[in-house]
Image (spheres, coloured by chain):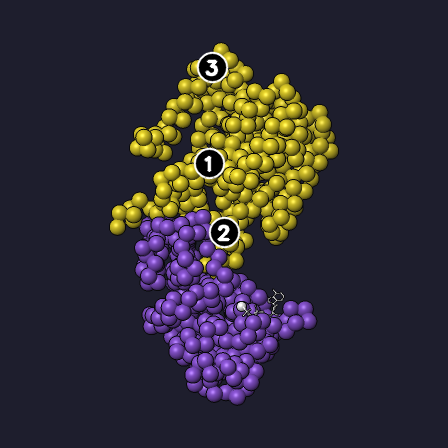
Amino acid sequence: MAFIEVKGITKKFGGLIAVDNVDFEIEKGKITAIIGPNGAGKSTFFNLINGFHKPTSGSILFEGKDITKIPVHKGAHLGIARTFQTTHLFEQSTVIDNVIVGHRLRTKSNLFDAVFRTKREKDEENRAYEIAMESLEFVGMAHLANTQVSTITQEAKKRVAIALALATGPKVMFLDEPAAGINPEETDGLAQLMKKIAASGITVCTIEHKMQMIMGMADKIMVLNQGAKIAEGTPDEIKNNPVVIEAYLGGEAIAEVN
Amino acid sequence: MDKIFNHRTLIALLIVFALVFPLIYADNRYVLHVMTIGFIFTISVYGMNIIAGFTGQLSLAHAGFFAIGAYSLGILTTRTEMNFWLALLLAVLITSAAGLLLGAIALRTKEHFFAIYTLIVGYLIYLLIDKWDGLTGGVRGLIGIPIPDPIGPLNFESATAMYYLVLFFLLLSIFIAVRIVRSLTGRTYIAIRNSEELAQTLGINTKVNKLVSFVISVAYAGLAGALYASLTRFIGPDVASTNMVFNFLMYLIVGGIGTLSGPLVGTMLFVWLEQFLRSYQEYHLLIFGPILVIMVIFFPTGIVGGFYRIKARLQQKKVPKDNKYFNPVPVKSTKK
Ligand SMILES: Nc1ncnc2c1ncn2[C@@H]1O[C@H](COP(=O)(O)OP(=O)(O)OP(=O)(O)O)[C@@H](O)[C@H]1O
Ligand SMILES: [Mg+2]
C-alpha cells in the first residue's frame, strides 16, 4: 500500500484544466518535489490533496483510506499539514502565539473548560505551549518566540510557518514554495531543514522553483506542465529526460543545474 | 509607576469605583439610570466583540438579537406572568436558539456578504416586531414590564438595586469573555479571524467554531436586551433598529475591536458623551461622525489598541507585554 496515492485526478476551473488526469504516489519518509512552470497546476494539486478543492474526477488515498471528499480540517487530524505560497501568519501577534494554536487539533478543551478554567484546559494550554516551543526549536526559531511576526525576516516567517505545520503533529507536510523570496544562503538552510524534517519521520512534499535546491535534496520529482504530469523520477532521471528538457527546463536551465 | 498601575490594581480600582458609584450619586437617580443603561449596552457590545472582534465575522444583526432578548422577557413576564428569573433565563435561551438557527444560515456567507446578510436579518427582526401586533404590541410597544422579582430579602425596587444587579451581570459577562478569549477556544476563534484557510489547515472546524461563537455573542445580546426591558419597563420596535446596531458598532470600534477592555471603554465614553451633548440633539452626530472617521483611520484597533501601541513604542520593545489579542503564554510555562 502506497502512503499517498493519487489516482487519475483532474481539476477543471470552468474551461481551464488546472490539473489533468494525474497519477502519482508519495512514498513515506521521503522528500518528494513537484516542479513546473508558473500556472502548471502545482498549487492546485496541493489544494486537491489538502481538500481545499474537490477534484472534478479521480481520487486520493491516504494510507489506503479514501480522502478525496473529506473537509480540510479532517485531513489535518489524519496528519496532513501544509504551508502556503504566501505565509498566512498573524503579523500583529507574537511568533509563539501564532504557533500555539497549531496543537489545538490535538486538544479537547471546550467552552466549558474555558469558562471554568478546568485542569484539562490548563494542562492542554501548557502542552500546546511546549509543543509550540519544541516546533520553534526544531526550525531554529525559538529565540524569536516572543517577537512580533511583523518584525521578523521573510526567511524567519517561512520557518515559523513550518513550525506551525509541525505543531499539528503531521505525518506528511506539503510545502508550497518554501524558498520563494529568500536568498541563496537561506535557501540552503531551508533545504537542510527539509532534510531534517524527513529524517524525523515526517514525509515531505514540496513545490519549488529553485532547481539546484531540488536536485540536491529530493528523492523523487514530478514535473507538471499545463496541468499534466510530463515526467517523474529521481533528480538524475529528470535532468536527463528529453521531454522535460524540451518542455520545461530548456537548454539554459540544464546548464545551470549541471 | 508600571508596577503600581498594573492590570490587576486597575481592575480592582474600577470595580471599587463601580461599587461606590451609587453612594456618590445616591440622590441622583438619573445619573444612576444612565450608568445602568451604559452597563447593559456594554454587555451587548462584549457579545458583539466575540463574533466580530475575535472570530472576525462582522455581524450586524446584533440589535435584532438584543430585541429578541428584550421582547422575550417582556412577553413572558407581561403575558404569562412568569417568574422574572425564569423569564430571564428563557429570554437568553430563546435568543441563543434564534442565533443558532439564523447563524447556521448566515454563516454560509463570508466577509462583507456576511455583514450585509446579517444587516438584513436584523432588519427583518425589526419588521417582525413592528408588524406582529398580536404578539409584540407593534408600534405601541410593550408596557408594564415588571422589575425583577425579589430574591429572598433582596428586592429591586430602587434604582440602586437595579444598578447593582446589572453591574453583577456586567462583571459576569466580562469575566466569561476574558476566560473565553484567553483559552484554547479563544485562540481557535482568533485563528479563524486571522485566516480561515490557515485555521482549516490546522485542523479547526471553522464552521462549528464560527457558529458557536456566534451563539455566544447572541446570548450576550439576549441577556442585555432582557435586562434593558426590565430596567426601562417599556420597549418598542426601535430596540431592533439599525440605528441601535450601528451604535453598538461605533462603541466597539472606538473602544477597540478585538480587545478585552474596548467594549467597556467605548460604550462608557459614548453613553456619557451623548448625555453631555444632549442639548444639541441631532447635532451630536456631527461630533460622533468625525470621531469615528478619525479613529478608523488612525486607531483601527480603537482607544485600547492605540493605547497598547503607544505604550509598546514608549517601552521600545518589539512586543507589547499585554498583547491586545492574545494572552501571554500560560504563566506556569513561561518560567521555563
Ligand atoms: N480557484 C481558482 N479558480 C480558477 N482558476 C484557478 C484557481 N486556482 C488556480 N487557477 C488556475 O489554475 C492554473 C494553475 O494554477 P496553480 O496556482 O495551481 O499554478 P502553480 O503551478 O502553483 O503556479 P505558480 O508557480 O505560479 O504558483 C492557473 O491557470 C490558475 O490561474
Ligand atoms: Mg503555486
The CA distance from mark 2 to mark 1 is 19 Å
Q: Of the residues under marks 2 and 3, which one precedes in the sequence? A: 3
Q: Residue B45, relative to residue B54: is it above or below?
A: above
Q: Which amino acid type is marked by label 2?
A: Asn
Q: How far across and how far down the image is residue B23, in percent?
A: 43, 15
The crowd level at tag 2 (other Cα within 10 Å; few <14, some 14-19, many 20+) is: many
Q: How far across and how far down the image is residue B99, in percent?
A: 58, 43
Q: Of the residues under marks 1 and 3, which one precedes in the sequence? A: 3
Q: Nearest the camera: A190 or B98?
A: A190
Which residue lies at the image location 53% right of the left edge and 76% below the top edge?
A36
Instruction: State the mark number for residue B225.
Output: none
Which residue lies at the image location 51% right of the left edge and 49% below the top edge?
B193
Q: Which amino acid type is marked by label 1?
A: Val
Residue A188 shows in the view: yes
Q: Give the labeled residue for mark 3.
A: B25
Which residue lies at the image location 62% right of the left edge and 45% below the top edge?
B115
Q: Which chain is purple?
A: A
Q: Nearest the camera: B7 or B80?
A: B7
